[in-house]
Image (cartoon, rainbow, N blue to C red):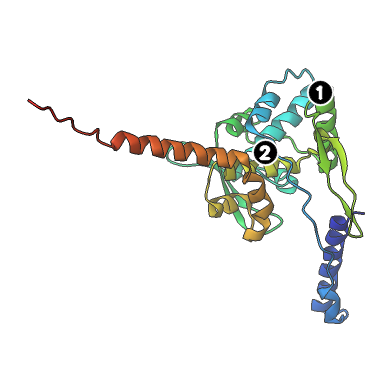
Amino acid sequence: MNDNSIAKRLNSFKSFLRYCTDEGIFSFDTTIFSYRVKKYDTGIVALNFDEIQQLMDLKIENPSWQKIIDVFICNCFMGLRISDLSRLSKADFLMDEGGDYKYASVNKKTGTTVSIPIIDIPLAILKKYDFRLPTYTGQYFNSQLQKIFEHFKLFEDEVVVRRKVFKKELDKKVMRRTIITSHTCRKSFITFCIMSLIPLNVIMKASGHKQLETMQSYIQKASDKEQFKKLNRKANEAIKEKRKKVLKPSMKFII
């Protein structure tokens, strides 16, 4: 297994040992809890708005595939984990006085209450299924997603996948579609929010993150040339606006 997988398994094992200690089953030496496997950044695989539109424009004849794509697109604008997505119910969606919907529920992993405004694209899909999206296991959903991408020849550009095994880097090139999964929805949602300059505390309320550090990888993704292009546009607009306010020098006439 790669180092990240080992770190995850080790954390689960330590949680079990803490449970045994708390229940009085056995007391373990506390030094074992300090052992950690350092995780590494695998990079963010996120779709952009044009790629979402590309999925929306697909002519899919297979009803099962259409459901998979509907769920995928919808969740790119909600950012739920697959465990929370499978627990969706109509009662989770509230409508305010202005007629706008929001999703409000307790995050299964962190136990925090999340609040996600529902914009037009996911709302149309949710209404299509009467706010009860089709549910799938993560493994089945991801396998079907790969079949759809392969069939329509989508996301065939190559990317470098970084893995570390016993602290040794093993990088290789793969088609981007092979690493797009259900979790890509969550990554895309958070990236959309950051690129749209939504405050981090608002994003964390929607994503259910408790600590800012866990958002760091998403922030790095958003801090690319597109952000600097926005800065450049804003700077140019400010300069143009300032020039408009500069009075033209008065002309003196000699009579």
Q: CA distance from mark 2 to mark 1?
A: 22 Å
Q: Identify which residue is drawn at 60% across, 44% down.
A: 91
Local packing at callout 1 (Cα closer than 10 Å; few below 14, some 14-19, many 20+) is few
Decide if residue 229 is in sight here.
yes
Q: Nearer the viewer, residue 136 or 157?
A: 157
Look at label 1 and name its amino acid: Lys
Q: Residue at x 73, y 29 (%)?
A: 69
Q: Point out residue 98 in the picture as x, y percentages from the top left corner.
A: 43, 38
Give residue 18's position: percent from left, percent from top.
81, 74
The part of the image, by quadrant, that contains residue 71 is: top right
Which quadrant of the figure has residue 148?
Answer: top right
Name the residue located 86 percent from the left edge and 38 percent from the top edge: 173
**Residue sitting at x 57%, y 50%:** 203
The picture places residue 30, in percent across and down from the top left corner, at 83, 80
* Mark found first going from the N terminus, 2 or 1: 2
Depicted 113 relative to depicted 96: above or below: below
Secondary element under disc 2, as helix, strand or loop, is helix
User: Circle 1 is placed at which residue position?
Assistant: 153
Q: What's the amino acid at mark 2? A: Asn
Location of residue 55 (image quadrant): top right
Extreme-front residue of the structure: 254
Is label 1 in a helix, a strand or a loop?
Answer: loop
The answer to whether the residues at label 2 and label 1 have Cβ atoms under 8 Å apart is: no
Q: Quadrant of the N terminus?
A: bottom right
**Nearer the observer, disc 2 or disc 1?**
1
- To which residue does mark 2 refer? 75
Closer to us: 139 or 234:
234
